[in-house]
Amino acid sequence: MSILNNYRINFFGGIEVDVSVPNNKATYPVDGQKHDIFNPATSTLTDFIYKHGISDEEIIDMFQTPTEEGYFTNGGWNVYGQHSVTTQKVKVYTSGHPGAVTTDTPLANFDFSLLGSVNPDTNQAYTSSPVMVDLNPLGQTYSQIAVGGLLLGDPDKPLLYIQSDQICGNIGNSSGGLSFKTLIGANDAPGSSNFAGTWQVTFPITEDVKKASALSGNDEADQIIRGLLNTKGATGIVVNFSFFEMCPQMTTEEYNTKLAQRQTPRNPSVGRIIGTLSVACEGETANNPDGRLLISHIDNTERENQTAPAFACISKVQEQEFLSVNMSLAFLQSTFREDRAGFKTVPPKPAIDFGKLTIVGGKESTTYGPDYINYYQYGGIIDIPLDKQTSQSFASNPLVINGEKVVHNNHLLLKETSYRLYSSDIDVYVGDKAGDSKEITIQVRYLGGALDTDQTILLSTNENTPGFADYLDLDLDEGKPTRAIPVKAGATSFKYTIQVADNSPGKNDLDEMAGFYDINFNLGEAQQTINTRKFQYTNFDLVEGDPVTWELVYQHALRYHYLNFLGMSTVFPLNDAETILKHREGIKTRMSSRYWPTTLYMPIVRSMSPSQVRLINAFAFSEPWDPNKAI
């Protein structure tokens, strides 16, 4: 559990997430009824739109029309979002080993940035930002951020500089990626303003990273970074961070005024980010924190049964042992900030003061008084000193953390789930043909360590998944909606192969078996949900060798992406055949599998199927249709 038991660098600042919200669930009203516009499973428009001859202009006009309820527009609060994720005025506040993290550090005030990818062809950096990618835009469990690296300090004199394409995983309560954080959310904002999202990403430590880092000119700071990069057993740099107090930058009135003036305004969600950077060691999970999981059960709020996770481990510095706990989500706030947009360097309000914490594990207990005011400066992590007897008892028993006060009818109570399931393979693209498969690894723990006894993991599915499609071969137990997976005592993980069912139409002209599917792994209270997507494999009613027309490619591949992501089309109009032909070389490159891991892949939301990519390429290069051509 490297972030908790190694040297930490903690940062705080602002974050901007520019997601295009029609991507979620856009509807078109006809005769008092709302009808879906998009079919995200196939990345096309619904039959309803074609049956009623509804034009692009009518859909865009509907998106921009204010709602009857006076809440933004029918297209949501951000019709022209470009899915970028941008850190803003984020700086290091503290650093140090467990129990000795301090503001008195030579690393203080260094800038922290998440980066976009280096162009694979030109090796040019800083050409894009990280991008948010929903595997399932209708889902409510997880999202992911594609990132290209990170930077501490000045790009001309970097303290730490890494360029490496990685997926930043969205973590939470093992079954969902959002956690309740603020009792009273923002005015004129979605309900998500009450919640926080937590993320983790790991970048490999390479010789190139070592050569490009520790060049700030601050000798003490450079020495710390060199020491970090050369930590014994370290294989990577891990970053764990949370977004909270997120709301649209503009109010309904401000946004609708700009739309009425025929502008194409961006209205990103803006909020705060707090987090921690440390080293990752061999065997640790890349984008989901290792360690012990405690769940904060938040009662007596307007939204019942809300939870938030905390991650813990016992760390040791010299002879002193600590229980280190990341409480960044468990420390609640009472109200949202007053300043909607200009808050980046203003500290958040103090967390709710629940008084001293009592921590119990077995027959031993201890108390600790957190810094509720400045918790954000420390990544939300607390280090609780332990004597040896207490440490031994905590190591072998489930933990409970209790606050002494009841505030705003809320009581801080965290309970450890003795067993824990988690994975870095949260979002899985399983391929588009029958027999395609992907092996995933699920971590399994008992009190943060190996299983104490033989256990049975239960696999199940969620038939309420939006875009649900029965395209997987799950090999369920006969007559049951589950499958039992035995795991032996002493294990810390198991593997499972997700496979597209052989009865999927596969190479037929039309493959209805496309869409999204959630797989749940359960062990007692522990759960990990894996989101899967299968792209549609189709011939578009073409015969191999047929020519591909503009009308066909626009209807089956480009119209969905044009209308769903209008912000991108203000720069690069996907509804214009001449633009596609003029830029065909660049388009083909950006849609190639080589660009898939980068933040430069087109479309950045990765919603285009391989069949659609083949269709666009065939049109752009006047090639006959080939349903199996390499891309």
Image (cartoon, rainbow, N blue to C red):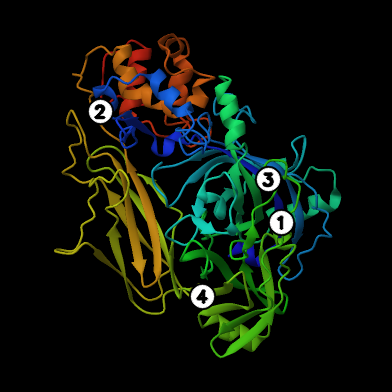
**x and y percentages locating residue 445 in the rendered image:** 45, 70
Whichever of callouts 1 and 2 sits on the residue coming sooner in the sequence is 1
As displayed, is residue 375 above or below residue 447? above
Front in this rendered view, residue 502 or 353: 353
Q: Nearer the viewer, mark 1 or mark 3?
A: 3
Q: What is the quadrant of the N terminus in the image?
A: bottom right
Q: Residue at point 23% right, 45% down?
A: 471
Under mark 1, the amino acid is: Ile
Q: Residues within 10 Å of mark 3 (few under 14, many from 20)?
A: many
Quadrant in the rendering for residue 61: top left
Q: CA distance from mark 3 to mark 4?
A: 31 Å
Under mark 3, the amino acid is: Gly
Residue labelled with disc 2: 47
Whichever of callouts 3 and 4 sits on the residue coming sooner in the sequence is 3
The answer to whether 202 appears left or right of 445 in the picture is right
Q: CA distance from mark 4 to mark 1?
A: 27 Å
Q: Residue at point 43% right, 35% down?
A: 23
Q: What is the quadrant of the C terminus in the image?
A: top left
Quadrant in the rendering for residue 505: top left
Residue labelled with disc 4: 415
* Residue 37 shows in the view: no
Under mark 2, the amino acid is: Asp
Front in this rendered view, residue 265 or 167: 265
* Residue 317 shows in the view: yes
Residue labelled with disc 3: 14
Residue labelled with disc 1: 9
Q: CA distance from mark 1 to mark 2?
A: 52 Å
Front in this rendered view, residue 272 or 455: 272
As displayed, is residue 169 above or below residue 46? below
**x and y percentages locating residue 332 in the rendered image:** 61, 63
Front in this rendered view, residue 338 or 586: 338
Q: Residues within 10 Å of mark 1 (few under 14, many from 20)?
A: many
